[in-house]
Every structure is written in C-alpha cells, then in structure tokens.
Image: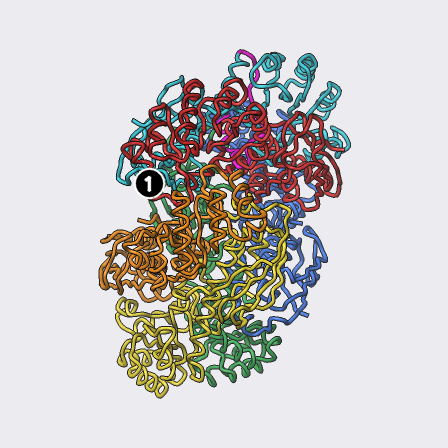
Chain colours: A green, B blue, C cyan, D red, E orange, F yellow
Amino acid sequence: MLKPPLDLIRLALAEDGAEADITTLSTVPAQQQASGSILTREAGVIAGLAIAAATFRLLDDNVSVELLVQDGAHVEPGDVLAHLSGPARSLLSAERVALNFLGRLSGIATLTARCVQVVEGTHARILDTRKTTPGLRSLEKAAVLLGGGQNHRFGLSDGVLIKDNHIKAAGGIAQAIEAARRTAPHLLKIEVECETLAEVQQALKARADVVLLDNMDTHMMHNAVELIRRDAPLVLIEASGNIGTNGEKLRAVASTGVDFISLGALTHSAPNFDVSLEFA
Amino acid sequence: MLKPPLDLIRLALAEDGAEADITTLSTVPAQQQASGSILTREAGVIAGLAIAAATFRLLDDNVSVELLVQDGAHVEPGDVLAHLSGPARSLLSAERVALNFLGRLSGIATLTARCVQVVEGTHARILDTRKTTPGLRSLEKAAVLLGGGQNHRFGLSDGVLIKDNHIKAAGGIAQAIEAARRTAPHLLKIEVECETLAEVQQALKARADVVLLDNMDTHMMHNAVELIRRDAPLVLIEASGNIGTNGEKLRAVASTGVDFISLGALTHSAPNFDVSLEFA
Amino acid sequence: MLKPPLDLIRLALAEDGAEADITTLSTVPAQQQASGSILTREAGVIAGLAIAAATFRLLDDNVSVELLVQDGAHVEPGDVLAHLSGPARSLLSAERVALNFLGRLSGIATLTARCVQVVEGTHARILDTRKTTPGLRSLEKAAVLLGGGQNHRFGLSDGVLIKDNHIKAAGGIAQAIEAARRTAPHLLKIEVECETLAEVQQALKARADVVLLDNMDTHMMHNAVELIRRDAPLVLIEASGNIGTNGEKLRAVASTGVDFISLGALTHSAPNFDVSLEFA
Amino acid sequence: MLKPPLDLIRLALAEDGAEADITTLSTVPAQQQASGSILTREAGVIAGLAIAAATFRLLDDNVSVELLVQDGAHVEPGDVLAHLSGPARSLLSAERVALNFLGRLSGIATLTARCVQVVEGTHARILDTRKTTPGLRSLEKAAVLLGGGQNHRFGLSDGVLIKDNHIKAAGGIAQAIEAARRTAPHLLKIEVECETLAEVQQALKARADVVLLDNMDTHMMHNAVELIRRDAPLVLIEASGNIGTNGEKLRAVASTGVDFISLGALTHSAPNFDVSLEFA
Amino acid sequence: MLKPPLDLIRLALAEDGAEADITTLSTVPAQQQASGSILTREAGVIAGLAIAAATFRLLDDNVSVELLVQDGAHVEPGDVLAHLSGPARSLLSAERVALNFLGRLSGIATLTARCVQVVEGTHARILDTRKTTPGLRSLEKAAVLLGGGQNHRFGLSDGVLIKDNHIKAAGGIAQAIEAARRTAPHLLKIEVECETLAEVQQALKARADVVLLDNMDTHMMHNAVELIRRDAPLVLIEASGNIGTNGEKLRAVASTGVDFISLGALTHSAPNFDVSLEFA
Amino acid sequence: MLKPPLDLIRLALAEDGAEADITTLSTVPAQQQASGSILTREAGVIAGLAIAAATFRLLDDNVSVELLVQDGAHVEPGDVLAHLSGPARSLLSAERVALNFLGRLSGIATLTARCVQVVEGTHARILDTRKTTPGLRSLEKAAVLLGGGQNHRFGLSDGVLIKDNHIKAAGGIAQAIEAARRTAPHLLKIEVECETLAEVQQALKARADVVLLDNMDTHMMHNAVELIRRDAPLVLIEASGNIGTNGEKLRAVASTGVDFISLGALTHSAPNFDVSLEFA
C-alpha cells in the first residue's frame, strides 16, 4: 500500500475547504452517521487506496475504513474497494479529495499495466520518466510500480544520463563519459543518449554502462540493438521518444529487443480512473 | 500571467534534485554560458509560462528569460514561447521541472479551449470542477480561465451545492434549501443537484438559485431547461455528468440551452501539452 | 466544539517556551502529579475550550482533560469549565497558552452574544467582518458563530462586495455589477455598498442581490429599507459603519428592518474573557 | 520600525484570499493605476506601519509606499501616515490585511501610551505580560515598547517567576528559590509572587531578586514596598492583578512606589486603533 | 529523556531516503520480522535514546522499542541500551538516522561528563556556549545538561552579556551596563566580559551582576577572582577562552575559584559516541 | 561556493534570538556603522564562507560582505576571509550563527583535506558516509567535496549497498545481488559488504559491481584486493571500518590498492575550525 503523504493530504483538504463545507454543515446534522462504499466504474489497477482512507481519517478520526483490496489489485467495473462508516458530515466533506488521489494514482497504475501488457512476451520492461506532476513525484512513481512498471531514476541526483547538450559541453561522448566517471558517486552507472548508430558506437567505445536509443525509428533501433549485443553484451539498452502508450509502436519497439522502454505519458497524460463513493 | 507558486516550484526542484544534477555538474563547466528557446510541438493555449521562467530563475537568478507570448496565447506547432540565457548548468538542471509545469497547465488550457470551441454559438459556458490534482487546484483553475472556461466554486466553503446525500440527510429538497438559506453566508447562492424533472420542480418550488442537471440524457435535459425557463426565468442552469470533452455529447448538451456545463476531465484527464527546450 | 488548530497551538507553545519553563523545571519534581479546574470569572459564552484542552495535551499527552461544558455554552462567574489532571509540570507550563486561546475566543463569543441580545426581537442578524487578527480568522469567525452571530464572507474569494472604489474603476454601479456577473463564479451573489438613496436605486436597477447601507444615519437607513422592500422584495439588506457593539445605535439600526448588521468590533476589539486555572 | 513578519503577512493574505479578490478582479482593469493615503481617525501611537507597507508590497512589488511617520509616532485624528501608489487592484486587495495589522498593533501601542501617561511622575514603569495573541507575541510586545512600556519576560525560558503552585510543589518559598538558583541559567534573576506581607518577608529572607506583589490592595502594597525598601534596597518590586488600564487604581498602585506594573490588558484587550485607506 | 524533535527526525529520515531504501526493499521481504539491540562500543553518557527510538517508530509504528537505560545513564562498552523488534525492513532503513542522533548527542554528553569530572572537587560548574550546530541547539544544550553541565543563555534574547564591541559602542563599561539596566527585561542579569584587572574593577564599580574572565592566564584569573570576592562577594564569576576540554588547563582554571567555566568545544567539537545496532 | 541554505540559516538565527539581541539593542545605537573582518586562527580548507555572508545579509540586507577567498581555499592562520561593513547591531547579532556555520563546515573540509593528503600517491580516494548531522547532510557532503574527498551515496535511494543483514534476509549473497538487480533502478550499481575472502569470492561470482571490504586487517585486505584485481578487473573496491582519520592505518589501507576509503569521522567527528570576527 502506498504510504499516505499526510502533509499533502492536509494541504488538499485545506485547499478544498473540507473543514468549512457549508453545504454539509447546514444540511446534515452533526450527529448523523452514515456508511458507504468506494466503487470502481471501470477496469484497471488500484493505487492510492490507503491514501483515500487516510484522507477520510485525517479529516475525522471517527471515520472507520475497511479496505477490501490492496494497492496493486486488478479490478473490474463495479468492484467494491472499501467500506466506510462514520459521521455523515465527514464522509461527505472528505469525499472529493479522497477520490482525487485515488483516481489520479489508479489512472497511472492502470495505464502502466496496459503498457506492460502490450509488451508481454518481449524482453522489455516499462519505465517511467521525470515527467511527473510537481510535488507528486514519489506517489506517481510508486503508482507506476504498482502497475507493473519499473522506475527510472527518481531525480537528477541518482543516476547519470548524458544527453546531447552534456556531450556538446564536454566536447564529445568520450569526454563526457570520462568526466562523469571521475566525479560521479561510484555507485551510479553512466547512461548515454544516442540518436544515431555512430553515437552508439562512440558510447560503447567509451564504455557507457547503458545506452539510450532516443527517437530512433524501429529499423534503426533494431540495428542498434544488434550492434550493442554483439560488441558489448553487458550494456543495458533503453528506448525512448514518441513511442506512445497504447499502440503498435510500443509493441514494435519492444520487439527490437531493448531492455527498457521509458514513457513520459505514464505520468503526464494518464487519464483519471473512475471511482465513486456510494452511500448505503 | 499565472503568478509563480514559489514554494511549489522550490519543492519540485528539490524533488528533482536540481541542485545535485550529477550529470550536468560532472560534464558541463561551471562557467559555461548557454542560450535556448522554449518551443511548442503542437497547437494549443499556453498556461504557466511565467512559472516556467520562475523555475529557471529560482534555481539560479543569473538566468535571463525573455517571454515572447503571454499566458493565454493561442499558439501553433513550432512557435517560440521564450528565450533563455545564462549558465548552461542552470538551464539544464531546471529544464525538466519548468517544462513539467508548462506542459501540464497548457494541457489544461488547451483542452478547455477545445471544449469552449465545441460549444461556440450556444449560450453555454464551460466550467471546471473540484476534480483537480491535490495541491495544484489554484493553478489548474487558473489554467481553465486562460483556456476560456469559467471557474465553478474553488472549494466547499465558497458555494452551496446540495447533492442527493444532503437532501436525504435534510429530509427533502425543500428542507435542505431552507437549512442552507438559514445558515450559509448571505453572499452564497444555493444550487441543487437534480436527476429527474420531479426533482427540478421541487427545487424551483423551494426557490433554489441554481439547478444542476446531473446525468440526464439530452432529451430530459431539454425538457428540464424548458420547464425552468418557463417557471423561474432567473434561475441558472448547470449540466454535468459523463459529458466528455471532445465530441457530440458536449455540443448536444450545450444546445439544450443550459447556462453552464461542468467537466471534470478538464483538470483530471487533460493530456500533457508538448513543449521542449532547444539549445542554440 | 472548535477544532483545535494544532499547528497554531504548537507555534504558541514554542513562542512561550513551554518546553523550557525554567521556573517549573527547577521547582517542581518531574514525577509530581496535580489536578485543577478551569473557572470563569465573569458571565459570557465559551469558545475555544477544546483548544485549551488540546494545548495541555499537545505539550504532554499524559494530561487528562474532562470538559464540563461545550463551546457555545452560556456561563456564569465561577462556573467550572473543565477538570485537568496530570504531571504538575505540564499543567503549569501549558496554562498560559491554553488560557490565551480560551480568553480571546470566549471574549469574541461573549461580545457577539451581547450584540445578538441587543437586537433581539428585530429581524436583524449580527455579522462579523474581515477585520480579524492575522492568522486567526477561522477561529475568530467560528467564535462569532458560537455567540449566535453569522459569518459574512470568509475572504475576498467567496463573495462579491462592490465598494466605492470598484464602482469608480468600473465606471458606475451598473457597469460594476454587470462586470461581476459576467466573470464571478455563478454561485456568488453580488452585494453593493451604498451611501445614498440614489446609489441604492442604481443598485436595485442593476439587479444587485444584496445592498449594503454604509455609514447612513438611521433616518436615511429607514428610508432605504422602505425603498428596497417596495421595489425589490427579494434583495437582502446589510447595514454597517460606526454602529458600535453595545448601545442604542445598534438597536436603532436593527429596528430599521435590515436583514444583517456587520460589526468589525466583534473581532477587532472584543475584550478578553476572564478565565483562570485553579489547582486543587 | 517593526520588522515585517513576512511569513505571517503571507498567511494573512492567503487567509483573506487576496490573490483571488473576485470583486476587484472583475470590476477593476488590470492596468489601472491608483494612489491613496493611510489616515488615522483617532489620536494615538502608531505601530506596524512598515508591516502595513510590506503587506501591499508582498502582494505586488509594483506598489510604492512612502511612509510619512515612523512607528512610535504620536498622531492626531486625520494625520496622514503613508502614501501609496501602484496597480489599483493590488491596493484594493491588500488593504484589509494591511489595516488589520496596523489597527491591532497601534491599538496596543496607544493603550500602553495611555497607561504610561497615567503613571507619569511616579517611579513606576509599565510592563506587558505573556497574555498575548497566539502567534503574535513578538509583534505585540514590540508594540508595547513603542507605546513607552517595557517588556516582561518573553516566555517561560527567559526568566524565573515563582508562583504559588511552584512554591507549594517545592515545599516553601525558600526551597523554591534555592532550587531555582541551583539550576536556572546564571544570567536569570529570580522573582517571587507574594500575596501577603509574610510571603514578602520570606522572599526577602531567601534573597529573591525581584518581588511580585499580586492582587494586593493599595494599602497592603504600600506596606510591602516600605518593608522591601527598608530591608532589601536592591530588590526590584513589581505589582500586578486587576489593576486595569485606564483609571485611578493604576495611578494609586504607581504611587505606592513600585518599580513595575504589569498589565495583561495591554495585549489581550486593547481596542483596535482606527485607520483607513482613502483613495485619491 | 530528551523529547524527540519530530520534525527534525522526519527531515533526517527524508534526507536519508529512508522510505526509498532500495537495497532493503529489494532484498528483504516485506513481511519479515527482526529484532536487535543498540549497543555501546565505548564508555560514556547516553543522550538521545528516546530520539533514536522515536526515529524507528516514526518510520514505522509497528516497531517496538524497549529502552533499558535512560538518557543521562553512564554506560560501559558493550552495554545494551535498547531492544528493538518489528519489520526487518523498517529496522534496517531507520538505523543510520537513529544512530546519527544518538551518537552525536551522547558524544556531547560524554565530553561534558569528562570535563565535569576534571573539575570535580572545585567550586566550578561547566557551562556550554552558543557555539552549537545550526538547528540543533536545544538538543545539544539538553545533552550538556545530561552530562552534568549547566546551560549558559540559550540565545541572545535571554541574558545580557556585554562584550568589548558593546563597550566600545556604548562609550565604556559603565555606560554599557547602565544602558542595559535601563532597557533590558528586569529579570535578566548583566554580565560583562573582561580581559584585564582594570576592566574587572570597572565592571564591579558599575555593579555588573556577573563578570566573565576571558582569555586570561590562570595567574591573572587568580588575581581577578580574589579581587571580586573581596570587593563584591555576590558577583558571579565565569571563565572562558581557549581552556580546552581535556587537560590541565581546565583543572587549573577551575582551581582559581571561578563559579563557571564555559567551553565551546562541548558542542562544536565533541567526537561522535560509538553505538551500533546488532541484529539478533 | 556552497549555496546558502536560506531556511536553515533563518532557523539558526531564530534559534539564537538574533532579532532580539538584548545586549546589542541596549548598548549599541541603531544608526552606528561598523566594519570588520573574518579571520582564521588555524590552517585548513574553507567551506561555508558564502553561507556566513548570507547569514549577515539575511538578518539585515544593509550589511555588505566582500569575500576575499572562495570555498575550497587552503588558508593559513591569520588569513582574512572576508570584509564586512554595515550597521554595527547587525554585525554583532549575526556573528555567532555565521561563525557556527563556517567553523563546522570548514572543520569538515579541513579534516577531509588532511586525509586526502595522507593517502597521496596511492590510488585511493577518500569518501564520506551517511554518518552526518541530522538536517545538514547536503552541506556536510559538499564540505567533503571541497576538502578534496568524494561523496558516497547521498542516501538510501541512490545506490545499492548490500550488508550482512540484507544477505541474511535474502538467503545469501547471490540471492541478494540477484534480487537487487531485478528491482533496483537500472542506473544503480550493486555494492556488497564483505568481511572475509570467502564472501568476496561469492560477491564476484554473483557479479557485484563494487565490493566493500569491511573491518578487514590490512593483510586480509591486501589479499582481497589481489583476488579481485585478478578475477574481476572491472570491479571497484572500497574499504571501511575503524580506519581513523589521522594516522598510519589510513595510509596502510590506501597502500593495499583499494579504490575508495570511506570515513565516518569526516562528518561525525570533525573538530570545529577556528575562525573569528574582528571589528576594525
């Protein structure tokens, strides 16, 4: 289960004015109790259920929540995810924030799972990127894990990924790799972004640990993979760039034999997952 | 221009490890200067450009940014939004966070503008909802405005919107409206969610200020609008529920004569807008 | 009961150095237990009792508090509000902060109740204003509710109140109302501040939802009320400006038939309510 | 000048929704400039003028403020305190928060100055207490200084003040003083609260540095002062307890020859000082 | 026991990435339980044990901690300080942060205890200074207390300590003392730093409450003490300046008869105390 | 130059009561200007000079600071590091906090430089550890870099370091490495802690990227290095465990041919570097 980010939940409740829900305060008696269920309206993978539960309980610790599935569960439309009971006011006032978390994170997990399924049977693993919502990176990356994906580096401090501008600044691929090897922490591998086979060859020659094939068509990518496997069998291969999350292109890229495919859309364009709270 | 949320930008930079960008620190000399441009790769409406600029400058106030368009501008693929110049390291280390803000907010503005265009020529105005990203509500609602939409209430404290569970708790539509009128601040109107014509009639009888037609098919919605216009011409009408952002349903709903259409997808499912930073 | 604002209580305890109470630490043994009561020394309405309790418990959760009355209770001098027991050091070190909250908020509730009593039998309801202590607005407005008053808008985002400078900027009352109607969220009513009957007439003509009679003498106010009731029976009427909290003027204003009287003094000049902690 | 508490000002602006001032945003054009003056409506001592200025400038640094007086100035009704100019929207949206600070702090300074005047010609200096608004202690104590008062200890960590419960816990006045002397930081004096002459004698015998005469009538207080001056001429004397801020009692207490009179009302019950912003 | 500084512990856990301990997450099963002990590897005084315990429990409240000694305990190498049990992952991921607190604070307590022992039999008490780690002052000063030392003032607001530059600015020792007596809170004593006997004489003449003998050799210090005891027996005497924490100089200074010796090294140069977590 | 951590500096100034420096406020006139220099009293490497400068300027931006050396400079006793000028009060009130940062960080840089010098001529590079002061890790690790050392992983999320308990939990070295390779981000290398030659052999067999020789005597370490260089020339070698910072042991370990030596004492036991502020 994703650990609830208490400060962010508090911020979201404040942002929504959940403690000053005028409609509820004026129409629902303080002592009225209620119960309800969180239901899915589509198929997918759940992420953020404990966060949704914590949202209700942060607003009012008299709310009881029973979780029926775990984060990571594959669900069908109409599945019940949790039962809630407690003061009616608190259920109503926390509902929107709770579902906002659950819908967004499950949306990411579900899209990830769909991509993982597309590449099933190939060698490729699905990676996220740093294209996440400001302030929500750790949640969104955790949702990718729950969907069966794998995390690329969390941020700029935990991996070396040399791109074209670094190469230009350093004076060439070899110089950039050499500079990184000299000063980066010794537990970090060095990945180099390549757009041509010539660049791939230079990266291998300079002993890159990982090669990123960026924006290549699948034909060139196929050749690149072949080249790398032949000359440097221990080197890892990642593909990225306009691959998309739902179609043939993704499958074709996976079929070239790359180790990893990174997809910005997992976190920056996942549609919301449809969940609702139904009162008993 | 959207006012840059400095604390959130700082959080996002920290989250990304922008001050410990190992790749850049090891491959790019400290004194190297660079310049570049932020470019669009698709058509749409820009939101968050000053935020992107502030991101670079928060990391390093030696970066200069010249904005070529304003938030709210309609752009075409390849348009240049801003020129940047300054220490190469800072441009590289802040790039991702800056573009994450710009891509997400422009995505929302662009989707909103598309919906506004769909309903053009009708009376209907496009509204957002409270289905926003936790922590980013004010930014996302501002992006909706830039796209030509209008904001629904910001949170639970600045409007009365009576839904089915409030009605149940209060003992009926009339009782709920009466309770709200008695205790809500006197500057707030009272809106009532209705799913049937009978509910609409009750809401009018109890003198609701606004009626929300929720999850009605367009036929019933048409009848509801007619009924309201006849019996209570000052009452405002909002439509919501599974209307979608891109197709016929939206146009059909607008054609019924409602005043407002609220769309959760504007903020919870807008795809990222594609922008990039190209170095000179 | 007012919900304890934990962060503010922590700030207040820190500000008071409650964890470094040198006198207590040096004179009272760590293991010594004590008990005591919170007593009133005057008649009034209680607000902030749960906050006072939370203050003791935030400093030391070994303190037990039994509340004998609820926020909103009308009390007489000498009434016991709560029993406390626990480590003597903690009772002594948290005392001042706890009573600071309780004294200030009960002061506001008590002053409000007095004003409500003054207007008893009239139609008028007592409103607060935005003239609150920086950082304490939600607490102070809640204390007004407990005293029997009603809240005006919480801040600038949850109501439209057009004043003279807005009218000047917009080019007239009609233009200002029209501009507000076009862009303000559709759940907000529009109130216009008027100082003359001519302005009242313009506001009615432009279909203001609420009219604020500001700084009028009671004679003019009487005429304004009459005019509004005759021409626009659905329009709400608020009075404000130098009305004072304790005397004839307040009663006279209420007797003109206005719906609301707003009083800055409720929150900006309420005298402290006298409470004390007596040890057993 | 009181140094502006930037975080608290930001909080107060946020609390007031100053960046989402719907009325102003919809009625005042973005590019409109305005100017105005902050005026007093009563006589008193100013405190918080730089804070008010900072409030406008924190909302919008295009606002220019020219201060015509300094904090601590004695002013008459109608005096102009500052000129403001800048975007009309920003002047309007920040006005209330700026005046809330200025009104509250000047209220405290003014009440303090009045008390100082009452005791003029006597030896007594006016002290504040720890009965301050939660979160505003340093501002309120600074306002007391500006009014000509002097600060008692800031909190529980910067002074030893032994009260009845400490004495009981320690087993007597002598034991309490001895315990404090053994463990309190060596730069802190030891003050003992006494309600009878017998207690005063014990305190002197145990070599208290300061004696607090609490809740004594002026006759007993007179005798206590005489006793202390005779037996322990270096000991300082403070009076407190139901002395009030405006009348004969205060003068009478001062006339007994005490060194200090501490008054909770300076900070917990000071009426707001009336200031306004008038646009040109 | 030192009260755990929850915010700082959370910061330290975040800084260490304790919730994203990749090694542990990938090698240790989620459900695996473990138990272990915190052991000393050297002799000394313990400080921060409850903080270490709270560190484990803040990361995961399923961890149980049994403390076998209290803060302030004198321990020998190999002593067991606490038993821990709970999820193996949590024990491993919180270990480093917990030990960082415990090692640093026990290091300070241990060094303090050693200095206290050096001066045993003399009149002198060991004081800390304001030379503490930014952000950790209250913890470090509490550790000094646990080691048997005493605290000097916490900060610049809770004591008057007049140094050479203050004297220069005020125009002389007498003027500086007089100015401080006039405006400082009446519960604060006035200490004056003196480097010569002449300065000591001036300080006494101006009735300083405390004299600080700074950077004197032990011969001059001896004379200064004699002078003060003869002329002003109630004045307190503190020594400081290059005294060191471990040798003859400290003992010699104590033997001059001073009341206090303040040592910056207690907090700015205490070596870490060696503790470890051994799994069962 | 180390980038000043503004929030931490503000916290440290608040902790020290720098805005309520009673001594300075009462003895130094507000308008008095002063100038001074920061001087070293010992030889070493400077770290934190820009932080010290920022401390003065955060308290009062009227202070001017001219830096004469850069962070990383090797200095001799008596060297002038910076000139300061501005309001005398501000120089005096910020002095201690500024020097606390500078002394601690320069202490770390200086100790690191000394260790780097000890291993000069060998292949070994000096690494820090995660044994840092809670809340100051990034500053302390930056100081290590300035002293010529290199950083080990920043925290638990940016490197895989498998220790004995991970091995036990995973069921053996091979299983632990395999598990890490399957789930850790693909840019992280895998390091394994070994205490015997047998463990080293298992680590090599399982294709660890880095081997940590922990607590070995130099003889065994010598053999381990030989074994690794022969069988796995690309594998990196780190040594740790009771090596100490100042003597023969460090040199002997370096001479075994390891690539890295990690030293906890660099950050947890560095003595303060002696700097002072002398007024002109």
| Quarter residue B226 falls in | top right
Amino acid type at mark 1: Ser
The answer to whether residue F45 is above or below residue C257 is below
| Quarter residue D106 falls in | top right
- Region in magenta: C121-144
Q: Is residue C139 magenta?
A: yes
- Answer whether residue B5 is visible to the viewer in this image: yes
> In the image, residue D219 lies at what x, y percent?
43, 18
Query: Which residue is drawn at the image coordinates 44% and 43% (left, top)?
Result: E209
Q: Does the magenta stretch include residue A32?
A: no
Which residue in the protein does label 1 denote?
Answer: C26
Q: Nearer the viewer, residue D243 or C269?
A: D243
Tell me the chain of label 1.
C
Q: Residue furthest bottom?
A: F230
- Is B248 positioned to the left or the right of F199 in the image? right
The answer to whether residue F221 is above or below residue A132 is below
Q: Nearer the viewer, residue E164 or E104?
A: E164
- Is C256 positioned to the left or the right of D151 in the image? right
| Quarter residue B227 falls in | top right
Q: Nearer the viewer, residue E225 or F13?
A: E225
Query: Which residue is drawn at the image coordinates 68% and 65% (left, top)?
Result: B85
Query: Which residue is drawn at the image coordinates 52% and 46% (left, top)?
Result: F23
> In the image, residue F1 lies at what x, y percent?
56, 66
